[in-house]
Image (tube, grey):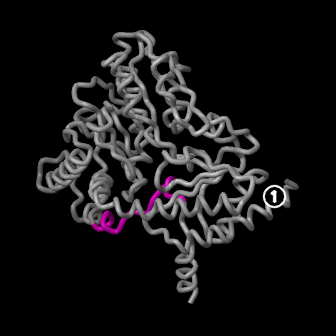
Amino acid sequence: MRKSKNKIQRQKRIYLDHAATTPVKKEVLKAIQPYFSEKFGNPSSVHFFGQEAKRAIDKSRQIIADFLNVKPTEIIFTSGGTEANNLAIKGIVFASRKKFSLPHVITSSVEHHCILHTCEYLERQKLAEVTYLPVDKFGMVNPLDLEKTIRSNTVFVSVMYANNEIGTIQPIKELVKITKRKNPSIIFHTDAVQAIGDLNCKINYLGVDMLSISGHKIGAPKGIGMLYIRSNIEIHPLLHGGPQEFRKRAGTENVVGIIGLGKAIELLRKKEKKNEKIKKLRDKLIKGILEKIPETILTGHPLKRLVNNASFCFKGVDGEAVLLNLDLEGIAASSGSACASLSLKPSHVLSACGIDPLIAKGAIRFTLGEENTEREIDKVLKVLPLIIKKLRKISGY
């Protein structure tokens, strides 16, 4: 009886935190299951079991390469977006020290912490100079700021395609053109972890030299990611050992994760109609919240934003208190980046957008997925205004 009751309660829960992670898709789960036990070979082994695993990896690499319109040899599998971004920045900086004693890196002030903390590490170790580009109130980088910042020793530019907290989409194509016009040898990298499920990530469209993605944001398992590296780019590996991943990332391959990532990428080709549905629900959520809850700020760009992102600052409340009250109603959301949810500091993204720290404390992010329904959005619009009203009364706002 208890199991049945728990199942009913679980079915009633509403998940609106897809930017943090997504459930593994049924098709992905089916594809990976045999590789846990039946097809368990090490891809480096020459016998049947090993070659069976290697063929599966090669197939996934080809699927991803076709999706991005690149060569399979330009796809390097990693443990996730964080490792991919670390490999991109550190790998280029270490390789560039042959030419420059202190290479110059440019990034934006609203990047994910795995970019910002890596850059800060390189600065502390006196391995690189770093410039952090400012953003406007919508979290958008001004291409002119990038142009002014490029120096003779600039070796690497990294600007994320779409922001994980506020959903703002950056003008990557324009930023790449400016960079290459100033100096074609500068490596341009984009963190496309949040963008891969919604935006055009084909390399011939963007023009980037490097691009990072993470599997668990698009229905693949956690613990798998990928870095695209354009051919002929010299990069130093972070992990040393065997010859795996074209000698750019040593270690026995995560066969299950790689197959899962390949399947998830394959499924993205069928997602266009689902994105239309998600955008419609997101627009309803944004409109409803702004109409029903006064003293609310929509964060991020009003138009140039991810189709599933609705992020706000509610004045006079604490975001963590809002999250707890939503959870009691069976609704899962986020106060910003999942990676920073344990931090008591205001979001660095909202600070960069010029939002007052006291207002930024009331930040909530809703990120929708394929399974969300209009009825679920209706419930959020029913309970959230009551929660905000109650918390504002308690705080004396």
Rendered residue at 39%/52% (across/down): 198
Rendered residue at 33%/25% (across/down): 236
At which x and y percent is residue 183? 34, 16
Q: Which residue is mark 1?
A: 392
Give the quarter of the image for residue 371. Answer: bottom left
Instruction: Identify which residue, 230 or 49, lies in the foreground.
Output: 230
Q: In the image, what residue type sits under mark 1? A: Arg
Instruction: Identify which residue, 188 or 321, lies in the foreground.
Output: 188
Height in image: 294 above or below 300? below
The overriding secondary structure of the stretch rendered in magenta is: loop
Which secondary structure lies at badge 1? helix
Height in image: 332 above or below 255? below
At which x and y percent is residue 195? 41, 47
Instruction: Identify which residue, 265 or 274, lies in the foreground.
Output: 274
Q: Which residue sits furthest bottom?
A: 1
| The magenta segment | 17-30
Q: Residues within 10 Å of mark 1 (few under 14, many from 20)?
A: some
Rendered residue at 58%/62% (across/down): 285
Q: Is residue 28 magenta?
A: yes
Give the quarter of the image for residue 102. Answer: top left
Q: Is residue 172 magenta?
A: no
Instruction: Identify which residue, 342 or 164, lies in the foreground.
Output: 164
Image position of 52 (left or right of 369): left
At which x and y percent is residue 336? 60, 49
